[in-house]
Image (cartoon, grey):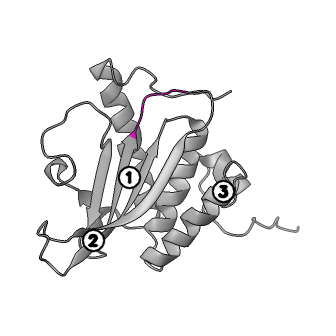
Amino acid sequence: MVHHLYRRFLVDHRVYRMAQRFWQKLCQRILRAQGKPRDWEKWPDGIVRGGPLDYSGNPMVSLISRTRRKAIVVIQEAPTTDAVQLTTWVDTFPFRGNREDKETIDYLVIACELCDEAGRVAAALMRIWTDDRVSFDAMEAVLEAYERTKGAGMFLTERRRQSHGTGRRRNARRKRPLKRRQK
């Protein structure tokens, strides 16, 4: 059974804002840990939805890095099942919002029913996408691999699972386990 977070976000504006803060803080933590918080800014809602906040969950958060030509859009959906529901894709958007413009922004979309596991997977995908070395094609390959192995935790290390959301483990991003000092 899945424990959904902010289950009533579509009917209670206070809960909606709490869910939105969850996603904003998650993004800030990831970008700060990678040393990139200033490169990313809020992607104007008008580009994605066409207007002011409408409390639909689409988007909960949208960020853009104009220098990296990448963006992240998170869509939260109302819980409908007791299973993890998470859909992801990458797409391209005209850089200046003009269809004739040759410059584009590649963006990652994460749509989910927010629960602990969906939050962990979303965080892992955001970490991968915000890495400068990860291209559109590489991210597509990651997403395809995730689809093939859903639920197997293919790119979530045990260390990341333990540290998600707590902010307590300072060495959670290390790739190798810490070696014990010998006396």
Q: Is residue 135 left or right of residue 115?
A: left
In this picture, is 105 found above or below 118? below
Q: CA distance from mark 3 to mark 1?
A: 19 Å
Number of numbered markers: 3
- Dot 2 or dot 3: first in sequence order is 2
**What residue is disc 1 on?**
28
Residue located 12% across and 76% down the image = 100
Q: CA distance from mark 2 to mark 1?
A: 20 Å
Residue 101 belongs to magenta span: no
Q: Give x and y (percent) for residue 67.
A: 26, 76
Badge 3, how many Cα within 10 Å: few under 14, some, many 20+?
Answer: some
Numbered badge on residue 156:
3
Give the magenta part as a residue range: 76-80
Element under disc 1: helix
Among the 4 quarters of the image, the one containing residue 116? top right
- Which quadrant of the rendered structure holds the C terminus? bottom right
